[in-house]
Image (tube, rainbow, N blue to C red):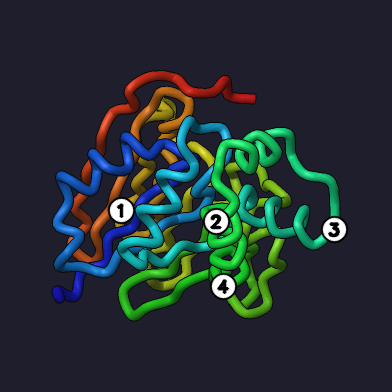
């Protein structure tokens, strides 16, 4: 296995694009990290989860993933998208997904980069960051990223930072925003670090309206 890590932006149930992306990236020779929000809004959550399970990919915990777990644990009522997603999945796939969410880390730090689903607050160590900030359950204005310099690249998903939603946001080697709105008709993006190579596949259609 190479020293490269391939990070893939928010999939949101877009199994077709996920499969197409895996066909074009050299993921078998690298570590694969999914940026979170594996399901909700897209057409085939079960297909995404079966692929993740088959290959043993690591995923960070996103706000949509957290919503399913907190619904299941009785913390709060679910998002409407979560209800639709559960109904679209087999019981076996859904139970596996819930267990996977329990095990999803809130962040990943390596020698080459730091990755979180959504955001970090300045001046706080990763271990001290509020979970709702890391997952995006509490969303910050996009300007949060401007004052962040962690000494190594920070990779996030969750929100679009480029004028063109289908284009990843790259600020030198400091910051990478990989949510390129696949479920909204954009693209699904993969980034390899430390090389910095980027791959994309275009969404087959717009599966959901952005709101």
List x then y, in percent, for residue 82.
67, 41
Helix or strand or loop: what does disc 4 sit on? Answer: helix
Q: Is residue 119 visible?
A: no
> Label 3 to label 1, Cα distance in Å?
42 Å
Foreground disc of the pair 4, 2:
2
Whichever of callouts 4 and 2 sits on the residue coming sooner in the sequence is: 2
Q: Earlier in the sequence, mark 3 or mark 2?
A: 3
Residue 197 higher or lower than 39, as above or below: below
Other-residue count near label 2 (Cα within 10 Å), few / some / many at <14 / 14–19 / ≥20: few
Spot occupied by residue 3 in the image (x, y as percentages of width and height):
19, 75
Above or below residue 160? Residue 5 is below
Residue 177: % across, % down: 42, 47
Q: Is residue 204 above or below residue 182?
A: above
In-image side of 24 versus 154 (left or right): left
- Residue bearing mark 4: 103
Q: Are marks 4 and 1 in contact (CB under 8 Å)?
A: no
Mark 1 — residue?
Answer: 172
Asked whether the residues under the numbered discs 3 and 2 touch, taking CB atoms below 8 Å apart as contact, a structural biologist would say no
Label of residue 74 in the image:
3
Residue identified by numbered label 2: 92
Q: Is residue 33 left or right of residue 43?
A: left
């Amino acid at each position: 296995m190479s020293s490269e890590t391939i990070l893939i932006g928010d999939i949101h149930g877009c199994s077709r694009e996920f499969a197409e992306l895996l066909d074009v990236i050299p993921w078998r020779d690298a570590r694969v990290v999914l940026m979170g929000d594996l399901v909700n809004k897209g057409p085939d959550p079960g297909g995404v989860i079966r692929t993740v399970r088959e290959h043993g990919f690591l995923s960070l915990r996103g706000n949509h993933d957290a919503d399913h777990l907190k619904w299941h644990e009785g913390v709060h009522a679910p998002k409407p998208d979560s209800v639709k997603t559960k109904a679209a999945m087999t019981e076996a796939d859904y139970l596996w997904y819930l267990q996977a969410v329990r095990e999803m880390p809130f962040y990943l730090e390596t020698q080459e980069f730091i990755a979180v689903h959504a955001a970090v607050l300045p001046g706080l160590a990763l271990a001290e960051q509020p979970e709702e900030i890391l997952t995006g359950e509490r969303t910050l204005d996009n300007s949060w990223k401007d004052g962040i310099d962690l000494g190594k690249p920070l990779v996030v998903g969750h929100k679009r930072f480029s004028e063109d939603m289908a284009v990843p946001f790259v600020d030198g080697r400091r910051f990478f925003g990989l949510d390129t709105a696949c479920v909204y008709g954009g693209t699904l993006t993969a980034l390899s670090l430390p090389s910095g190579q980027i791959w994309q596949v275009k969404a087959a259609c717009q599966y959901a309206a952005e709101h």
